[in-house]
Image (cartoon, grey):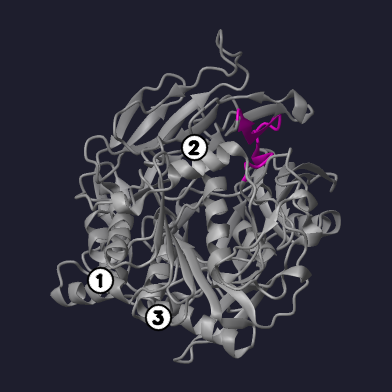
C-alpha cells in the first residue's frame, strides 16, 4: 500500500504535553478508589504521582522548522491556550517571537515554508472534520489593526472540500501543486496554485480515479497512483491528459514513488514487488519502467523507512530503517561525520532530522528517548556544533519515567510478535496490573521512544504492553498480509490476546488486573477483546473505535473511495456475502451480550472516519443489556482529541476509571475549568439513541 495512503488511514490521536505553571509532583493529591478494585499492593514503591498536565497539556514549544534561507525559526506554541504558529529570527531569543496565527478554537494542524522563505503555509480544518484548507501568512508582515497576527489568506476558499498538497517546487517558489475535491468529493483534481494571488490553474482533471499524485522537483505533474480492480496498485505516467501504466504490484504487495531523482528521468521507488519480503528502495526510469536496486535493509530485518536528501545538491545522503530502534546509513562521508558528531554532542536517544536550510548548513535535529521527551537542537554541519533550541516538555521529571523495552513473544501459531513493554519504575516486574495498548491504523506500528500514554499509565501503577500484531507495517509483506481479514476473531486479535497470556506466563501480569485501551483500530481491538475474550480483561477504554465493521465500511469518507479496494482486500468485501457474514461475526456490536467488563467509550462528534454512530450503537447495546458503560463525547473534536481542555478532561476520566477497575492510583484534583469540561463531555447513557448516518 502506498505510504501516503497508509498515512491517510492511520489513527490521529492527539499528542499530549504540558503547561509551565504546574503543581510539582509532591503537591498532587493522590487517591485510590474506595469501593472499586482492591488497591495495588506496590503503589508505595512508585515514584511521585506526576500531574496529568505534564503529559497531556499543551507543549511549551513544538514543531520547529528552519526557513529555507536560514533567517527564521518557526514553531508551534500556545496563544491564549491554543497551539498556534510563531516565528522568530534565528538569532533572536524566544521571548522576541511573534505569533503568526491566532486560531482560538483549534490547534493548527500542520505548516511548512514556501521554498523562497517568504510565506508560511499552514493547513486547518474545522472541529476535526478533516476538510483541510491551505492558508498563507507573511512572517515579515505587521499585524492588521486591532489584531495580534498578520492577516492569513485562505488559498482554497471552497465549501466542503479537503485540500491535498502534492508539491512545493524549489524552482517555482511562487506556486504549489494542490489537489481539490470540489468537483467530485471522491477524487482530487490537480491545480497549480499561485501563493501570492490565490489564483488556480487546472493542471489535470481527475477522471480516472487516481488516489495520489506525484510531481518532479520542478513541480511538474509526472505520476499518479491508482488501485487496480484486483486491489493492487499501478503507477501511471502523466503525458498531458493521458495516463500510461508503467509499474504495477498486486494486492499482496506495496509500491509507491518516494521522490524524483534530480535528473528528472528517474524516480525513487519503495517496493516489495516480486521476490523478497521487505520493502526496498529502487530507482525507476519513468519512460521505460525499468528499475535498479538502491538499497534493502542491510540486516534483513525490516522494511525501508526513510530516504534523506541534500537540499543543496538533491543527492541521497542517508537512509534509515526502523527495527526495535532506528538505524541510519550514511551515503557520503559528510553525513557519516555528522552522525558521529551528533552522537557525541547530543544525549543518547532516537535522532530525527526535522528541517534543513537550502544550503544544507543548518539542521534541526530532534532527540528523544523512552524516558525523555523530544528536545530540538540546531546543528551546524560546517562547524560540527550543536546548540539546544528548545525542549518540548521541560517539566517532565525524567528521573521518574519508566523504561520502554523491546520484547518478542510467540503467538499460538508460532509467529514471533514484536512489542514494547513499559514497567513502572521502582517496581519488580511481577504480578502487576497491566494495560494492553494496541495501536491504531491498523496499518501502522508502535516505535521505541517517549510515549506519553505509556508513561502516564506507568506512573499510575500499570505495566503497558504495546504489541505490533500481524497486519502492522514495517516488518515485511508476509507479516502484514497475515493480518488480512483477521480482525476481531482472527489472528490480529489473537496476537493481542497471546501478548496478555505471555505476560501472565512470565509472571509479569496479574491475570485478574488486565485492561485494554486503544484509539481508532486500537479502539476496535478494545471492543473485540471485551467481546470475544471477555475472560482476559477487567476493563476497557475505547477511543474513537468502530463497533461494527459493516457500518464502518458503509460510512467511509468520500475521498477514500479511490482506496476502497484496500478495505476489500485487508478487511473484507461488502459485495461478497461470505465476507459480509464473517465481518458481521467480527463486529463487537453483534457480540455485545458477551461483554461483561466495564467499558469507557470516548468519541469526537465530527469524526469523519469513525462516525459517532459507531460509539452510540455500542453504548446503547450495553446500556440496554444492563452492562456497565460510560461515555464521553466532544462536540468540537474529530478522530481523536486535539484541544488541551478535552485531553485533560479525557485523561482525568481514564485514570479514575482504571483506578476503579484495576486498583491503581489517580490524581483526584483538577482545575475547575477541566472539571467543568469533563462534566460537559460526559454523556448520560440513558439519553443516547442510535442515529442514521
- Say which label, 3 or 2, has the lower sequence index: 2
Q: Which residues are magenta?
A: 57-80
Residue 446 visible? The answer is: no
Q: Do the residues bearing badges 2 and 1 touch, measured as CB atoms within 8 Å?
A: no
- The local crowd at label 1, few if under 14, some if 14 to 19, many if 20 or more residues have their Cα within 10 Å, is some
Q: Position of residue 573 (x, y in %)?
A: 21, 69
Q: Position of residue 578 (x, y in %)?
A: 17, 78
State the residue position of label 1.
Answer: 590
Placement of the N terminus among the 4 image quadrants:
bottom left
Query: Quadrant location of residue 207?
Result: top left
Q: Do the residues bearing badges 1 and 3 touch, measured as CB atoms within 8 Å?
A: no
| Mark number, residue 533 | 3
- Say which label, 1 or 3, has the lower sequence index: 3
- Say which label, 2 or 1, has the lower sequence index: 2
In this view, the mark in front (2 or 1):
1
Which residue shows up at 48% across the image and 70% down it? 539
Q: Position of residue 463 (x, y in %)?
A: 63, 72
Which residue shows up at 35% across the image and 68% down it? 627
State the residue position of label 2.
Answer: 168
**Along the line of sight, the residue nearer the viewer: 668 or 649:** 668
Query: Disc 1 versus disc 3: distance between alpha carbons?
Result: 14 Å
Judged from the image, the secondary structure of the residue bearing numbered disc 3 is loop
User: How many tags in the picture?
Assistant: 3
Query: Disc 2 versus disc 1: distance between alpha carbons?
Result: 47 Å
Query: Quadrant location of residue 527?
Result: bottom left
Judged from the image, the secondary structure of the residue bearing numbered disc 1 is helix
Judged from the image, the secondary structure of the residue bearing numbered disc 2 is loop
Residue 507 visible? The answer is: yes
Q: Do the residues bearing badges 3 and 2 touch, measured as CB atoms within 8 Å?
A: no
Query: Disc 3 versus disc 2: distance between alpha carbons?
Result: 49 Å
Amino acid at each position: 500500500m502506498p505510504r501516503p495512503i497508509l498515512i491517510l488511514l492511520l489513527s490521529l490521536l492527539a499528542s499530549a504535553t504540558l503547561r509551565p505553571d504546574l503543581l510539582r509532583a509532591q503537591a498532587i493529591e493522590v487517591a485510590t478508589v474506595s469501593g472499586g478494585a482492591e488497591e495495588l499492593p506496590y503503589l508505595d514503591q512508585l515514584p511521585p504521582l506526576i500531574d496529568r498536565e505534564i503529559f497531556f497539556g499543551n507543549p511549551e514549544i513544538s514543531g520547529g522548522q528552519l526557513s529555507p534561507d536560514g533567517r527564521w525559526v518557526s514553531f508551534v506554541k500556545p496563544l491564549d491556550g491554543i497551539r498556534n504558529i510563531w516565528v522568530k529570527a534565528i538569532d533572536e531569543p524566544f521571548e522576541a517571537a511573534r505569533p503568526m496565527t491566532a486560531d482560538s478554537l483549534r490547534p493548527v494542524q500542520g505548516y511548512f515554508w514556501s521554498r523562497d522563505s517568504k510565506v508560511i503555509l499552514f493547513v486547518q480544518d474545522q472541529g476535526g472534520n478533516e476538510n483541510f484548507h491551505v492558508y498563507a501568512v507573511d512572517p515579515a508582515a505587521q499585524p492588521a489593526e486591532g489584531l495580534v497576527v498578520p492577516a492569513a489568506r485562505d488559498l482554497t476558499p471552497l465549501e466542503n472540500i479537503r485540500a491535498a498538497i502534492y508539491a512545493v517546487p524549489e524552482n517555482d517558489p511562487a506556486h504549489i501543486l494542490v489537489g481539490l475535491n470540489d468537483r467530485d468529493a471522491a477524487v482530487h483534481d490537480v491545480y497549480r496554485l499561485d501563493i501570492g494571488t490565490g489564483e488556480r490553474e487546472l493542471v489535470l482533471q481527475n477522471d480516472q480515479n487516481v488516489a495520489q499524485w506525484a510531481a518532479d522537483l520542478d513541480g511538474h505533474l509526472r505520476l499518479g497512483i491508482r488501485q487496480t480492480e484486483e486491489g493492487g496498485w499501478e503507477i501511471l505516467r502523466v503525458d498531458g491528459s493521458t495516463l500510461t501504466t508503467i509499474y504495477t504490484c498486486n494486492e499482496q504487495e506495496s509500491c509507491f514513488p518516494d521522490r524524483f531523482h534530480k535528473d528528472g528521468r528517474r524516480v525513487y521507488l519503495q517496493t516489495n514487488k516480486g521476490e523478497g519480503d521487505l520493502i526496498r528502495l529502487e530507482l525507476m526510469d519513468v519512460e521505460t519502467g525499468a528499475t535498479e536496486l538502491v538499497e534493502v535493509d542491510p540486516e534483513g530485518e525490516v522494511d525501508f523507512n526513510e530516504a534523506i536528501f541534500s537540499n543543496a545538491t538533491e543527492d541521497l545522503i542517508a537512509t534509515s530503517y526502523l527495527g526495535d530502534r532506528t538505524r541510519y546509513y550514511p551515503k557520503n562521508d559528510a553525513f557519516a561525520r555528522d552522525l558521529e558528531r551528533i552522537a557525541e554532542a547530543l544525549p543518547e536517544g532516537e535522532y530525527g532530522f526535522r528541517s534543513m536550510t537550502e544550503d544544507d548548513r543548518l539542521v534541526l535535529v530532534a532527540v528523544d528517548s523512552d524516558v525523555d521527551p523530544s528536545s530540538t537542537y540546531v546543528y551546524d554541519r560546517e562547524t560540527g556544533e550543536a546548540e539546544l533550541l528548545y525542549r518540548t516538555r521541560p517539566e517532565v521529571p525524567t528521573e521518574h519515567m519508566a523504561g520502554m523495552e523491546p520484547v518478542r513473544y510467540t503467538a499460538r501459531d508460532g509467529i514471533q510478535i514484536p512489542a514494547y513493554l513499559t514497567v513502572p519504575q521502582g517496581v519488580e516486574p511481577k504480578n502487576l496490573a497491566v494495560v494492553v495498548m494496541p495501536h491504531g491504523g491498523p496499518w501502522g506500528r508502535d516505535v521505541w521512544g517517549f510515549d506519553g500514554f505509556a508513561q502516564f499509565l506507568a506512573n499510575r501503577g500499570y505495566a503497558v504492553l504495546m504489541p505490533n500484531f500481524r497486519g502492522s507495517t514495517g516488518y515485511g509483506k508476509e507479516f502484514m498480509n497475515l493480518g488480512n481479514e483477521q480482525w476481531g476473531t482472527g489472528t490480529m486479535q489473537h496476537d493481542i490476546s497471546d501478548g496478555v497470556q505471555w505476560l501472565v506466563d512470565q509472571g509479569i501480569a496479574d491475570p485478574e488486573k488486565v485492561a485494554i485501551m486503544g484509539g481508532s483500530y486500537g479502539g476496535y481491538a478494545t471492543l473485540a477483546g471485551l467481546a470475544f475474550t471477555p475472560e482476559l480483561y477487567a476493563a476497557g477504554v475505547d477511543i474513537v473505535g468502530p463497533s461494527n465493521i459493516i457500518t464502518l465500511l458503509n460510512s467511509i469518507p468520500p475521498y477514500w473511495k479511490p482506496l476502497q479496494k484496500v478495505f476489500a482486500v485487508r478487511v473484507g468485501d461488502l459485495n461478497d456475502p461470505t465476507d459480509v457474514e464473517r465481518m458481521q461475526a467480527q463486529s463487537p456490536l453483534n457480540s455485545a451480550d458477551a461483554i461483561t467488563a466495564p467499558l469507557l467509550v470516548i468519541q469526537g462528534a465530527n469524526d469523519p472516519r469513525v462516525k459517532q454512530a459507531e460509539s452510540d450503537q455500542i453504548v446503547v447495546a450495553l446500556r440496554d443489556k444492563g452492562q456497565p458503560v460510560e461515555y464521553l463525547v466532544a462536540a468540537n473534536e474529530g478522530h481523536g482529541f486535539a484541544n488541551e481542555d478535552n485531553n485533560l478532561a479525557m485523561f482525568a476520566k481514564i485514570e479514575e476509571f482504571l483506578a476503579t477497575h484495576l486498583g491503581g492510583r489517580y490524581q483526584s484534583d483538577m482545575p475547575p475549568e477541566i472539571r467543568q469540561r469533563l462534566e460537559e463531555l460526559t454523556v448520560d447513557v440513558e439519553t443516547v439513541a442510535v442515529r442514521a448516518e
